[in-house]
C-alpha cells in the first residue's frame, strides 16, 4: 500500500496541517455531493485539531453539510470522561452550529457493547442507504495509533480484526479489561481518504514498526489499514518520526 507521509516540527504544526486536510476533503465532498461524511477518532492526539476546526478554521468547515460519525467508542455513557463522544463534543461540536441529526454517536451507554455495535451498524446502513452486503464509503476517516499498534478499537489479537462481513464490532479488550465498539477494517479500507495523526516520541517505535516492518496485522492492526480505492495519509510530528530516518 502506498501512503503519503508528512512530518511536522511539533504537535501544533501537525494539527494545523490536519485542519487544512480536513477542510480540503470537506470542500471536495460538499462541492461534489453537497455533504461530507467523516468518522472521528478518539484519544488525545486529535483534540488540538478539533479545537482548531471550531476556532481558526471555523469559517472553512461546512458544519451544516458535515455528518459526524466516530471510528470507535468506549463502553461508557456519553457524559463519561473516557467517552470519545464526550471529548469531541467538548472540544468541538458543542461550540459549532451542527444540526443534531448530523451527529451520529455510538451509544456506548448500552449495557451490552455488541448491541451498541449492532445499532451503529444499522445507523450506518440507514444513513448511507446500503444494501445487505454493502459497505459505507466515508469521505474521510481520522485515525490515531496506539503504542501497541492498535487503531480505532482494533487491538492486537482482537477477533474484530478477522471480521469481514460486519461494519462494526463490540470486542472485549483483555488488556483494558473492558469492551469497545469499533468500525471494522472493511469500513476503514473503503474510505475515500484516511488521515492518521501520530504525535510524540512514545509512538516512534510503533510508527517505525507499522510503516517499515513486515510484522503481521495481528501484531500491529494499524498495518491492516490500506484503503482499496482511497488516499492513506500519515501526518506525524518529528518526535514520532524520529526512528524513520526521514
Ligand atoms: C481511542 C482511539 C484510539 C486512539 C489511539 C491513540 O478510542 O482511544 O480511537 O484508537 O486513536 O489509542 O490515542 P492517543 O491519540 O491518545 O495517543
Image (cartoon, rainbow, N blue to C red):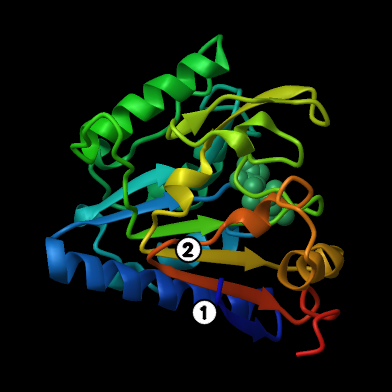
- Corner quadrant of residue 28: bottom left
239 above or below 81?
below
- Residue positioned 55% across, 9% down in the render: 111
Q: Which residue is under mark 2?
A: 194
Q: Position of residue 63 (x, y in %)?
A: 26, 57
Residue neighbourhood size for the residue with mark 2, other residues' Cα within 10 Å, grouped as few (<14), some (14–19), many (≥20): many
- Residue positioned 38% across, 65% down in the render: 229
Residue 44 visible, this angle? no
242 above or below 49?
below
CA gap, disc 1 to disc 2?
14 Å
Residue neighbourhood size for the residue with mark 1, other residues' Cα within 10 Å, grouped as few (<14), some (14–19), many (≥20): some
Q: Position of residue 7 (x, y in %)?
A: 66, 84
Q: Residue furthest bottom?
A: 246
- Residue positioned 23% across, 41% down in the render: 128
Mark closer to the chain start, 1 or 2: 1
Q: Is mark 1 within 8 Å of ligand 1?
A: no
Q: Which residue is under mark 1?
A: 17
Q: Is residue 209 left or right of residue 128?
A: right
| Foreground pick, 106 / 228 | 228
Q: Is mark 2 within 8 Å of ligand 1?
A: no
- Corner quadrant of residue 240: bottom right
Amino acid at each position: 500500500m502506498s501512503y503519503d507521509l508528512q512530518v511536522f516540527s511539533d504537535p501544533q504544526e501537525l494539527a494545523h496541517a490536519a485542519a487544512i486536510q480536513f477542510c480540503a476533503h470537506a470542500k471536495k465532498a460538499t462541492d461534489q455531493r453537497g455533504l461530507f461524511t467523516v468518522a472521528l477518532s478518539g484519544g488525545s492526539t486529535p483534540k488540538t485539531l478539533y479545537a482548531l476546526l471550531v476556532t481558526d478554521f471555523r469559517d472553512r468547515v461546512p458544519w451544516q453539510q458535515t455528518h459526524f460519525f466516530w471510528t470507535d467508542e468506549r463502553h461508557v455513557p456519553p457524559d463519561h470522561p473516557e467517552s470519545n463522544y464526550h471529548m469531541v463534543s467538548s472540544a468541538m461540536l458543542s461550540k459549532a452550529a451542527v444540526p443534531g441529526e448530523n451527529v451520529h454517536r455510538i451509544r456506548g451507554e448500552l449495557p451490552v457493547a455488541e448491541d451498541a455495535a449492532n445499532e451503529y451498524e444499522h445507523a450506518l446502513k440507514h444513513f448511507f442507504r446500503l444494501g445487505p452486503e454493502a459497505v459505507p464509503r466515508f469521505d474521510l476517516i481520522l485515525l490515531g495509533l496506539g503504542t501497541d499498534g492498535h487503531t480505532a478499537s482494533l487491538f492486537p489479537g482482537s477477533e474484530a480484526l478477522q471480521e469481514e462481513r460486519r461494519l462494526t464490532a463490540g470486542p472485549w479488550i483483555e488488556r483494558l479489561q473492558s469492551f469497545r465498539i469499533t468500525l471494522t477494517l472493511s469500513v476503514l479500507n473503503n474510505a475515500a481518504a484516511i488521515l492518521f495523526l501520530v504525535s510524540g516520541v512514545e509512538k516512534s517505535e510503533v510508527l517505525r514498526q507499522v510503516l517499515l516492518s513486515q510484522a503481521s496485522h495481528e501484531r500491529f492492526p494499524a498495518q491492516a489499514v490500506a484503503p482499496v480505492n482511497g488516499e492513506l495519509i500519515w501526518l506525524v510530528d518529528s518526535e514520532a518520526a524520529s526512528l524513520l530516518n526521514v
